[in-house]
Amino acid sequence: MKKLVVSALCSIVLLTGALAGCNAFQKEENTTVELAEVTRSIFYAPLYVAMEQGFFEEENLNIELTTTWGGDKTMTSLLSDGADVALVGAETSIYVNAQEPAEPIINFAMLTQTDGTFLMAKEETDSFSWEDLEGTTFLGQRKGGMPQMTGEYVLKQHDIDPAADLNLIQNIDFANIANAYASGTGEYVQLFEPQATLFEQEGLGQIVASFGEESGALPYTVFMAKEGFINGDEDTALRFTRAIYKAQQWIYDASPEDIASTISPYFDDTPEEVIADSAVRYRDQESYAQTPVLPEEAWDNLQNIMEEAGELPEPSDYDEFVNTELAEKVMED
């Protein structure tokens, strides 16, 4: 009888262990995350690092990346469940949340913490001054976008009235700004990398200032999701944030060559040396966030710039629309 009882107990133990093992295996299965990025940019290098260095894979996440080409399209994809997570400027969440959607949009991991544009002058100079822009034609970014708001904010900080002190052009599509400048429009232009470095190498101008350095810390590009995704699948959001944090640490330790070779598959038409120079320029001015935490001071600075531009629909509460718990947790692990 004892042998039968012992045998039965052993069977139960083995079965329980097998079930536990099965449950553990189920937890290790890959989770697919649909991710929409607003554009393809070296500015977003840590994201591509996380994908190419296997940091998402280590977290058992399968990332399906789509480039949606524009803030409106990115947010539409997120709101319509075409994407689980969006990588886009934090200002877009403020616009959407002001319209009181069915589910609030929550910012949960910051990727870039400064503006990503540079001021390029057509004429080379050894002694640039912001006063040099007065009376010139300045080819800026699309009105209402974060680059334009930041650009005008910086000009005002240097006592330049964008409406009165220069000829400000803002009616050219983002994709055509570089071509317009190369074709002769404007003495100055506001450009992202790698276009700024490419133009400098081609002798089409000189980078004379950084809007990122001038405007201070901003939640310029952030991973965001519907509140239901954060609350309903916190484990996935946590693993996603951990992978991004690993990439942020990696990019600040890696050589320029390693960064370029890692993310070059995402930029087929850009030479690796240009990728390296662009990425290091962003890293040197700490445009890449070093942690996923979105600080309240950066959130407030964003709203100040939006208000100065007349684009802030209403004050957006940091505690309501920013979740730092996930980022803080992965940093503690």
Image (cartoon, rainbow, N blue to C red):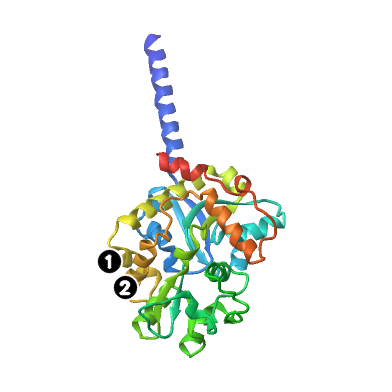
Relative to 46, residue 153 above or below: below
Q: Residue at x 41, y 32 (%)?
A: 18
Q: Position of residue 82 (x, y in %)?
A: 60, 60
Q: Position of residue 77 (x, y in %)?
A: 61, 62
Q: CA distance from mark 1 to mark 2?
A: 8 Å
Tell me the amino acid under the disc marked 2: Glu
Q: Position of residue 229 (x, y in %)?
A: 59, 48
Quadrant for residue 47, please give it. bottom left
Disc 1 vs disc 2: Cβ atoms closer than 8 Å?
yes
Mark 1 or mark 2, earlier in chain = 1
Relative to 26, residue 262 above or below: below
- Badge 1 density bin: few <14, some 14–19, many ≥20, Cα 10 Å: some
Task: Tell me the quarter of the image containing the C terminus.
Answer: top left
Q: Which residue is mark 1?
A: 257
* Visible residue check, residue 76: no
Q: Residue at x 63, y 46 (%)?
A: 320
* Visible residue check, residue 43: yes
Quadrant for residue 101, please give it. bottom right
- Badge 2 density bin: few <14, some 14–19, many ≥20, Cα 10 Å: many
Tell me the amino acid under the disc marked 1: Glu
Task: Tell me the quarter of the image containing the N terminus.
Answer: top left
Q: Residue furthest bottom?
A: 184
How many numbered marks have been drawn onto this rendered protein structure? 2
Q: Residue furthest top?
A: 1
Q: Which mark is residue 272?
A: 2
Q: Residue at x 32, y 69 (%)?
A: 276
SS under mark 2: helix
Quadrant for residue 278, please give it. bottom left
Relative to 239, residue 197 above or below: below
